[in-house]
Image (cartoon, helix red, strand yellow):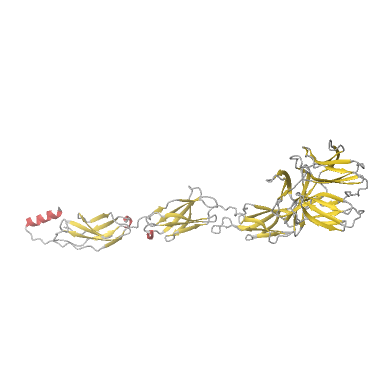
Amino acid sequence: MRNIFLLFSLIFSGFAVFAQPLVAPTLTDFPSTITTSSFLIGITDTNPTEIALEVEIEGGGMTRLTILAPGTNLQHSVINLLPKTFYRVRARALNCATSVACGDIGPWSLPFYITTKVAAPVAPIVKLDNNCARFVSISWEIPARAEDITNFVVHRAFDGVTFHNIGTLPGYQRNLFDLGIAPGVPATYIVFAENSTGITSSNRITVPVKPFVAPLPPINVQSSTVNKTDTQLNITWENPPQDFDCGTNIRSSYYVMIKREGDADYKLYEIIYPTASGIIIKGLKPNERVEYDIFSLSDKGIFSEHRRGVDNTFGPASKPTNLIGVAFKDALNNSSIGLSWDHAPKDEDYFIIEASKDGINFNVLGKIKDGNNTFKHEPIEEGVDYIYRVKAGNYRYGESDYVVTQPIKFAYSAKPNTPYGLKAVASGSKVDLKWYDDSNKEENYIIERSVDNKTSFVELKKLDRNATSYTDNTVTSGKTYFYQVKAANTLGSSAASNIVEVKITAGTGVLSNSEVSIFPNPTLNFITVNLPTDLSFETLNISILDQSNLEVYNKNYNSKVVKINLEELKSGVYTLLIKTESESSSRKIVKY
């Protein structure tokens, strides 16, 4: 208004007036007002007649013009700017309301340069890199404007609430190794990004910090046969993996414990280095049972699980155990006794099985190789108490003691078969009878005699099982006798054999059943025949008949002690016939 009033006053007063030229304003800044998006500029204008002021802001890819009312000392707030952007500011006076189509525009002021402040940092994104008992490693990413960050501050809390500064890092660093963790205690982390404008916090991550744990136990612990002797054992194993990345279960040593026979508990044998894969335990006894226990200790004093085993040193084979026998009929209806036993140490090369009927005299039934813990005894005689014993042996160190059964009996399953082939030879006041045994079920043989032309038979003699001959010394010269034989057991007796007739006449040559010893019987391969030393003969004939009465062996001898090889004969019951010039005898033999 003051300019308009001055103009009209000059016109009406009739004076000639000439307008003064416009001059450039002067700019000043206020650094404390600079923010990320604004600043305050001071304008000093000395023009007395200007109509307006025009302010130009240029930067950040734009130019902004603002018209201000005139004044001597103005403060202009520039807003809506970009952070961290360089701006040029200048101003000029106008004698118009706008610079568009204005004919009187003053010069621009000297430019003034202002840079807006940088924005607060973008929040870091934190992640876990390594979780160990000795340290935790974290890292972080900056999604944008990483260059704006001056430094990082890392906070940690063990309770998720009480945080402490554990490191201030330069703005270019992106990770941290925390060596101050507590094994097995969770740790929570926050990373703060800082610059001149402010601080921004990251996401939280909670790390279940690994604890120190027991080492893994040794693998495949066993007693090896390599370097095993009668005084030492070689215990071997494989080393399990270790956590070398984090060191949670590093072995520092192996412990070797043993329990020998007679020890109440394990005793320390030796502590050995952590990479060992075996140890030789020395100073043991032959065939000694040793229990062993292998485990490890970590560098943090934590023991692994135990791995145990047991073995025997070499030596004479261990005594079998749990020998049992069961009487049964096999698939072919043969009377049999099955034997079985245990032999856990597995230190045998063979087993020897023996049988006895009196518990004193034992005969070998068989020798079987290792790994076979059963044996079938057949044929057997029903109604007989058998006592068995078994021992184990190896070819290097010898044989064990016997394990012995109680008497085992196959109860009679039926009446015995009828004897067959009864023959009689009279000599003076004697009658020699012989027959064939056709049964394994007899308990006795009953000799019956008739003196009334077979009208009635009376028991003459009861003989033990397996008898095949008898001499009747109660005959009278001039009489005729009839004989028959029966086999009997507790279930009854068999039918009578064929009947033989003998007439006793004077002058008949003597033919007696001399005492003959045959052993072993039963047998696996050989038998020995012993004749009485007072027996006189020139030629001895021995023949063997099978159950079909077929001759399978015949040979002459001139010795009173004869050894006969039966290896080529099949298992079964045979009749052995012995004849001299004056006497004869028959016996039943059993070949296994």
In x, y percent, where is residue 342?
A: 71, 49
Describe residue 149's horizontal placement relative to residue 483 as left or right: left
In x, y percent, where is residue 282?
A: 73, 59
In x, y percent, where is residue 392?
A: 75, 53
Residue 566 in sight: yes
Q: What residue is rendered at 81% in x and 54% in y?
A: 543
- Circle count: 0
- Residue, far top: 456
Determine whether 486 is above or below 576 in the image.
Answer: above
Question: Residue 86 or 160: which is nearer the viewer?
Answer: 160
Where is residue 147, by image quadrant?
bottom left
Question: Residue 200 or 550: which is nearer the viewer?
Answer: 550
Describe residue 149's horizontal placement relative to residue 558 as left or right: left
Describe residue 142's horizontal placement relative to residue 361 as left or right: left
Question: Residue 231 or 370: which is nearer the viewer?
Answer: 370
Question: Residue 525 or 68: which is nearer the viewer?
Answer: 525
Residue 285 in sight: no
In x, y percent, where is residue 28?
A: 27, 59
